[in-house]
C-alpha cells in the first residue's frame, strides 16, 4: 500500500486514553481532548465534538478499551460488566450511523468470548479496539486508491458535509478519494457545500482541504443546482452513515437533494464508505433518522439567532437517497455498481 | 375586489418621501426609514434594506418622484435632468430583478413626455409613481385571489426566500396566494426554507407569516428533498425576479434546486409574479446573475464567521429554473400554463 501524509488525526489512542480533535470548535480553534471515561466520549459523540460515522465507531471502540484498560480491578466479571455498561451507553449516543453499532458489536463479541482471566479480557479488548482503529485508516486509504480511478484530471468534485479525515480516525472516505487523486498529481478542484445546520462543510471540509493545499470553493447548500446548471461540477462524492443491502444510502441531511440534482444533470453521484457502513439487517422503514435540537436550525453555531425565537422547525440530521440515484458505492473491497441488491451481497461476501 | 388586512407595508409614500421597512434588521428590529434622496434609496436597495423584485421597482419609482417633488426648482429642464439622473442611478443598483427596469421605464416615459411646464412634469411624475405603487398592491391581491384557487384545504405549501409583503409594497406575491387561501378559511400550513446566505426565509417569511397567525415551519435549504420524500409538501410556490418569454424563471438562489426536487416528487411547482416581472426582450444568456459580496457566504448576517476567513466562495444571488420544471405561473391576469412561449405572449397581450 502506498503511503500518504496523515496530516489530521481526528481520533487516536494515546497512553491508554482516547484522544480526539474537538471538531465543534473548528475552524477557529484546534483543540484536542483526552479521556479514559466512556461517559466523556459518549457526550463528545452526542454533542458532535466527534462526528462522522467511521470516527464515531472508532471512538466508541477506543472508549470501551480505555474504560477497561484503566479500570482499578482485574476481576474478569467486573471488567466484563464494565465493558458491557460502556457498550450500552455508547450505543445510545446517536441512532443513525451504522459503524457505531458495527464497532460496538465487534467489541461485544470480544467481551463475551471466553477469557482465561481479567487480564486476558483486558488485553483482548484493547487489541480489538486498536485493530478497529488501524483498520479504519487502512480501509480509508484503500477507498481512496480504488475511488481515485473514477476521477479524471481536471475534475471538479462536489462534496457535502465532511466525509474527511475529521469524520474518521484519519484520511477520510469521500475526501480519501480526493486526497489520493490529488497526491497522484491529478489537477482537481473541490466544491464544498456549507451543510447547514451544523456547517460541517464550511467548518471542516474547507479547513482540512485547505490545510493540505487542495483547492476548495465554498457554496451554500442551495447553490447545488446552480453550479451543476453552469457546468461547474463533474462528479459528486459523499460519505454515508448507513447503507442498506438494497443500496439505500442514509447520509447527512441534504445528500438526497444533491443526488436528485446530479441525476438531472447526468453527473455521476458516488458514495464512498467502508463496508462497516452496510447494515445487513434493517429495512428502509426501520432506520431511525435522528431529529436534533431545533436551536441548531434557529441559531447559527449556537450564537446568532437567525429567526423568530420560538418558531417550529424540522431538524433531521440525515436523509435517505434511493439506489436509483447512486451511480456507484466505493468501498475498500471495490466499487459496487447497480444492481445493488445483487452486488452489495457479492462484495460483502469477499475477503479484503 | 375583496379587502384583506394589509398588516405589513414594506414601501410607502409618506408626505413626499419614500418610507421603507429596513428588512435587513428583521426579525429582531422593526425599523422604518424615510428619505427624499434617490441616492439613499439606491443604497437601501443595494444593501438589501429594500429587497424583492416588486418592492425594488416601487421604491425606485417613488424615489424618482420624491427627488422631483422636493427639488428646489420649477424649471422644466432642470427637473427633467434631475429625474433622469435619479433613474440612471437607480437602474444601476441591482441587475437581475426585471420589475426595477420596468418601473424605471414607466417613469422615464413620463419624464420624456411633453409637459406644459416644470410643475406639470412634477405632478405627472408623482402621479405615475403613486400609480405604480397602488397598482402593485392591487396586482398582488389579484395574484392571491387567482392563485388561491390552486390551493386545497389542508395543503402544506413550501416557499423559498421571501415573496411576501416584505418583497412588495404590501401583501406579497407567493405569500399573497397563501394569505388569500388562509383568509378564505383553508387550513393550510407553510414550510419556509431559511434561504442562505441572506436568510430571507428565516428572517422575513417566518416573521411575516407568524405576525398574521399563518402556521409556518422553518427548514434549512438542504432539507427540501427530505420533506418531499416524507410526503410533507403538497405544493411549492415561489416568487420571481425575472421571467423570460419562453418561461425561464430567474429567482432567488436555490429556487432551481427546489424545482428539480419537486419534479421528482410530482409536486406542483408554481411561480407567483406580476406581469411586470416578464422581460419581453432578453434571451437566457443575456440575463445578468448578480454575484454578491463573498462575505455574505463566509459569515452569517455579517456577524459570525463560519469558515476559514479567506476561502474562495461563489455567491450568485439568483438561479434559473427552466420552463419544464414550472407547473404554472400565477399572474394578476390569470394562470399561465405550458406551452409558455405561446401562453405568456397571450396573457401579456390581454388587458388587466
Image: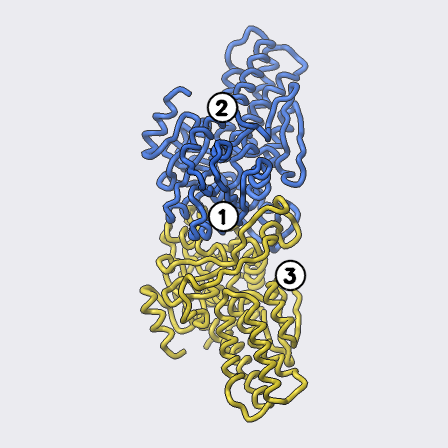
Chain colours: A blue, B yellow
Considering only vertical position in the picture, is A120 above or below A224?
A: above
The quadrant in which the N terminus of chain B is found is bottom left
Q: Separation of disc 2 and disc 3 at Cα? A: 54 Å
Taking the view exactly as shown, the residue that stands out farthest to the bottom is: B116
In this view, A223 is above or below B272: above
On the image, the x and y values in percent for residue B24 come to: 62, 61
Chain holding disc 3: B
Check disc 1 and report the residue beneath it: B222
> Dot 3: few (<14), some (14–19), or many (≥20) neighbours within 10 Å?
some
Residue shown at 66%/61% (left/top)? B29
* Quadrant, the C terminus of chain B: bottom left
Name the residue tied to disc 2: A2
Query: Which mark, residue B25?
Result: 3
Q: Which quadrant would residue A128 be assigned to in this image? A: top right
Q: Secondary structure at mark 1?
A: helix
- Mark 2: which secondary structure? loop
Chain letter of the residue carrying label 1 = B
Amino acid at each position: 500500500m502506498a503511503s500518504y501524509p496523515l496530516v489530521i488525526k481526528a481520533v487516536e489512542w494515546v497512553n491508554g486514553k482516547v484522544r480526539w480533535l474537538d471538531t465543534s470548535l473548528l475552524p477557529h480553534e484546534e483543540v484536542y481532548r483526552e479521556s479514559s471515561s466512556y461517559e466523556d466520549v459518549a457526550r463528545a459523540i452526542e454533542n458532535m465534538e466527534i462526528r462522522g460515522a467511521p470516527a464515531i465507531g472508532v471512538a466508541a471502540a477506543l472508549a470501551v478499551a480505555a474504560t477497561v484498560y484503566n479500570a482499578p480491578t482485574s476481576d474478569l466479571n467486573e471488567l466484563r460488566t464494565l465493558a458491557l455498561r460502556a457498550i450500552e451507553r455508547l450505543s445510545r449516543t446517536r441512532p443513525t450511523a451504522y459503524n457505531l453499532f458495527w464497532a460496538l458489536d465487534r467489541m461485544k463479541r470480544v467481551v463475551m468470548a471466553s477469557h482465561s482471566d481479567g487480564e486476558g479480557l483486558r488485553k483482548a479488548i484493547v487489541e480489538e479496539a486498536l485493530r478497529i482503529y488501524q483498520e479504519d485508516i487502512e480501509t480509508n486509504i484503500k477507498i481512496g486508491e480504488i475511488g481515485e480511478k473514477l476521477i479524471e484530471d481536471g475534475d471538479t468534485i462536489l462534496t457535502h458535509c465532511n466525509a474527511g479525515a475529521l469524520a474518521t480516525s484519519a484520511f477520510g472516505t469521500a475526501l480519501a478519494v480526493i486526497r489520493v487523486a490529488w497526491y497522484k498529481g491529478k489537477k482537481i478542484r473541490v466544491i464544498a457545500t456549507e451543510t447547514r445546520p451544523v456547517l460541517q462543510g464550511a467548518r471542516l471540509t474547507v479547513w482540512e482541504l485547505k490545510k493540505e493545499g487542495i483547492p476548495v470553493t465554498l457554496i451554500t447548500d442551495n447553490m447545488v443546482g446552480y453550479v451543476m446548471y453552469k457546468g461547474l461540477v463533474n462528479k459528486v462524492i459523499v460519505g454515508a452513515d448507513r447503507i442498506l443491502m438494497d443500496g439505500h444510502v442514509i447520509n447527512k441531511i441534504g445528500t438526497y437533494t444533491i443526488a436528485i440534482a446530479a441525476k438531472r444533470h447526468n453527473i455521476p453521484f458516488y458514495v464512498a464508505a467502508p463496508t462497516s457502513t452496510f447494515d445487513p439487517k434493517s429495512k428502509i422503514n426501520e432506520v431511525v433518522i435522528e431529529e436534533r435540537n431545533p436551536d441548531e436550525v434557529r441559531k447559527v453555531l449556537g450564537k446568532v439567532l437567525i429567526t423568530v425565537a420560538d418558531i417550529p422547525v424540522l431538524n433531521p440530521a440525515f436523509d435517505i437517497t434511493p439506489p436509483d440515484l447512486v451511480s456507484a458505492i466505493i468501498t475498500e473491497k471495490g466499487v459496487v455498481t447497480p444492481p445493488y441488491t445483487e452486488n452489495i451481497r457479492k462484495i460483502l461476501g469477499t475477503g479484503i
